[in-house]
Image (spheres, grey):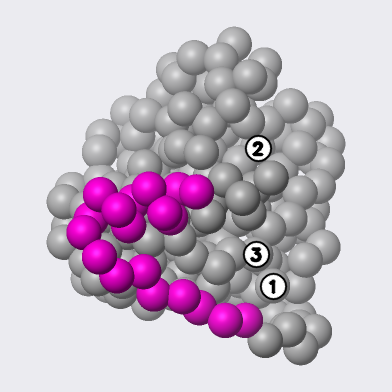
Amino acid sequence: MRTDAYTPEAICRCMGLPSFERDPACTSATEAVRLLLQPSFHPEVCITFADGHVSVVNARAMIWRQFEPSPMLTDRDDARIGPEAFARLLASMEPTKHVGAVPGIAVDGMPVELLHFQGGSSIVKAGRNASGKGDFSAFVSLAITTAWECISSPYCRNALSETAKYVGKNLPQVDEPVRKPTIETMVLGPEEDRVQLLEALRRHHDG
């Protein structure tokens, strides 16, 4: 995929989320934290902490390897998160607020985009390669671990386990139930027609 097409907005829409920055799950919350994990060798994962809940959405295949942004099969889970765990996450995030923007695509690492919302407004937008050591890596590690401990979906937990390795954290892999077979469809034709058809299919799936 072209690097200019591989944006947080495009990635989230590929995973069936309304938006990275304008998702009502974040903008309607009293306080929310969202992380978009982009590991170099594993599928992308979006973690959202909002008003006592944590949600995880992970692509089943790497969006980065697609020819262009397109809808992807995903796994999803949602669970409660206690106020103490959320408070620890916010405290860990504090030193990372001014890390700047992700400086491009990492060949061997995991760029992470971070958003922090209060009262529906984004007050922090930051990111960098989370691999290695330092405050940002420690915060991302805590976010992944917290989400892993809260959710129950084995698919989402294993996706988080893979991303945890990029920040030096080992989380157990769990047994996954056998998936039902899926059929993928390729849409050919002019870009405008493809976009309209894919958007109609997305609305039908979401409905």
Secondary structure category for the residue under label 2: strand
* Residue picked out by circle 2: 49
Where's residue 194, x and y in %? 32, 57
Q: Quadrant of residue 8?
A: top left
Q: Is residue 195 magenta?
A: yes
Mark 1 burial class by Cα count in 10 Å: few <14, some 14-19, many 20+:
many
Q: Quadrant of residue 92?
A: top right
Amino acid type, callout 3: Asp
Q: Which disc number belongs to residue 75?
A: 3
Say which element carries label 3. strand
Which residue is label 1 attached to? 155
Vertical position of residue 125 compared to residue 196: above or below? above
Q: Residue 160 in the image: state x and y as whole percent.
A: 60, 65
Q: Nearer the viewer, residue 90 or 7?
A: 7
- Name the spot of residue 139 as percent of width and height, x first: 52, 45
Label 1 is placed on what type of residue?
Tyr
Q: Which mark is residue 166?
A: none
Which residue sits at x=53%, y=51%?
Answer: 202
Q: Residue at x 47, y 27 (%)?
A: 22
Residue at the spot 46% in from the left edge and 70% down from the top edge: 43
Residues shaded magenta: 182-200
Circles 1 and 3: CB distance less than 8 Å? yes
Is 80 included in the stretch rendered in magenta?
no
Could you classify mark 2 by the number of other residues whose Cα lies within 10 Å: few (under 14), some (14-19), or many (20 or more)? many
In the image: residue 168, left or right of residue 190: right
Residue 5 falls left or right of residue 122 = left
Say which of marks 3 and 2 sits in front. Answer: 3
